[in-house]
Amino acid sequence: MSAERLEVHPTRQELLTLKRRKILAEGIADILQKDLEVLIISLVKYRERATILRTQLYDILKSSYNKFIEAEMVSGNLKVKELALTTTPIDFNVETSTATGVLGIQFPALKLVKQEGGEYKPRLSLYDAPIQLEEAASRINDVIVAVTELASITAAIREILEVISLKRRQINRIRYKIVPQFDATIDYIEYILEEIEQQDTIRVRVLQRKRKERAEISYETDSV
Amino acid sequence: MKPTRYNTIMPRVAFESLKLIDIQVLVRLIGKNLEEIFSFLVNTSYKEEIVNTCGDKVEVSLLEDALFNNYAKTFNKLIKNSSEYIKNLLMAVLHKFDALNLKTMLRMVQAGMDTEDILQHIIPLGMYDREKCQTLLSEVNLIGDIVGSLRDQDFGFTLKETIKTQKIIGDISPLETALDREAFSGILKEIKNLHRHDRKIATNILGIEIDALNVGIILKYKTLMTDHENIKENFMPVAQINEKILESAIKEPDVKSTLQHFLKCVETKHQVYQSLFTKLVKESDSPISRLEYILRKAPLEMSFFELKKNMRYYNIGYILSFLNMKWAEIMNLRCIINAIARNVGKDQTLDLLILPENYKT
């Protein structure tokens, strides 16, 4: 598929401008490529961190769930349900802000804000709640921090992926659209300029020939 | 210890003891499915309650309910067949379940639950059964009103006094503590009315449960809470491990030293207490749930000890030990049923069963 030409005057000035623009476009594509590589490296790092966090999260959730099941086994399904329904919920909030990350990209940052009570009181009944239920609840409490961090990382990954796709689109546009357009236009201008040059040469030759003929005619007339 | 006081209850206890499920058979239930457990229970002393409660539905909550119904029926039979001398103690023990149901009711009312939901969580044991709770909840639906509607002798007085001195409005934990304290005080008070030898046995069997509860509270606080100041507010009345020992144990820096302190303090006390704390010290590095499990097993260990020690037929030990064994059986069945419902492995289930110390798989 041949690239479309730009609508320009086929002049030497335009040719020089186009060549300069082509070099500039290729330079931009190289810079974008380097940005892309940096973004991919950063994405890999974030992904590794997310994988580690997710594994830790699953492990804690699994052990917490195991403790919860143990609590059901020890105190019965109904008692656990009753204690779960009647316990005071943990008050926490998630603050959202932005943080500057790789290449100055603004990532959404989540921060867990826990309500700090003055006096620490047990959440569940000291006599009726099996310790497994307290353990399960405290593990879930710890896991919330990891969940927030994982959410931040996931948001950063999503942002990086968007920027990567944007950069890739920009590189592709330069490499496969703008540069071929420049090439086609340069080729066209060069072709036109060459044509003009050839025509000029022919014209010069014709003129020279005509001048020569005229000179010969005037010489003959003079000699007669 | 007059045999006349036991002449009707002892045959009943002996008869009910025969209905207890053999430990080996119980352990073999692990890993079976709920239908198999249902079929097994239908062929045991639980038949009537299983059929009446579950019908043809095999659900964990219904099975749990049936088990409690059976315990209630057995308990009521014992009360019916006991003399005044024993009846008072059994009624005091049954008050423990009244406290349990009242706590459930208060908690759920505080959480704004519907009456129907609350009744589902009431266990069919003691005076505050579903019918009584429904009547109570149909008339009032606020904590203060519920407390106000209770008779003074049925925890009413204690709860009203607790509400008067309550520091934080809406906090029902002082009420819960007051209920448990009242129930256990009642048991200890009734123990004092027993004959000398019976009193000693009952103090050992019922006292170890209360002491284990106090030790458990200290261990929970040591593990979960940073503020140790208000542990004392949560203590139950004491049996063999007195307030002085408990208060000095609070001051210990960690779980291990606390248990070592207890072991030192019970050196001159009952053999079962010594072996209990030796075991706890040995396992002090284990998770707190393991320590709680050892404490939970203590009343059963004491029951077996007292049964071996007091071979004479007419004593309160037989009755209280039977009740502990029956309760342990129900707890074990409930544990197995819940384990099956959640696909828990055999080893994990076995670890949570309340089995005799010398039990070998």
Image (cartoon, coloured by chain):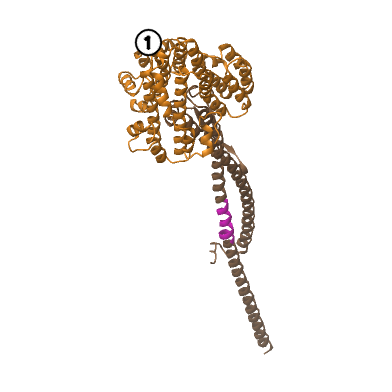
Which residue type does callout 1 highlight? Asp
Q: How many marks?
A: 1
Q: In the rendered view, would you say A184 is above or below B45?
A: below
- Between A5 and B54, the one lying in front of the other is B54
* Residue highlighted by disc 1: B152
Q: Residue at x 68, y 85 (%)?
A: A219
Question: Principal SS element in the magenta part?
Answer: helix
> Helix or strand or loop: what does disc 1 sit on?
helix
In which quarter of the view is residue B333 placed? top left
Q: Give the percent coordinates (x, y) of residue B39.
A: 38, 39
Indicate left or right for B190 with A223 as reference: left
Is residue A72 highlighted in magenta? no
Q: In the rendered view, would you say A182 is above or below A72?
A: below
Q: Is residue B88 visible?
A: no
The span shown in magenta is A167-179
**Neighbours of disc 1 within 10 Å: few (<14), some (14-19), many (20+):** few
Q: Is residue A209 visible?
A: yes
Q: Give the percent coordinates (x, y) of residue B63.
A: 39, 33
Rendered colour, chain A: brown
Q: Give the percent coordinates (x, y) of residue A133.
A: 50, 29
Q: In the rendered view, would you say B300 is above or below B337?
A: above
Q: Give the percent coordinates (x, y) of residue A76.
A: 44, 30
Q: Residue at x 63, y 23 (%)?
A: B256
Rendered colour, chain B: orange
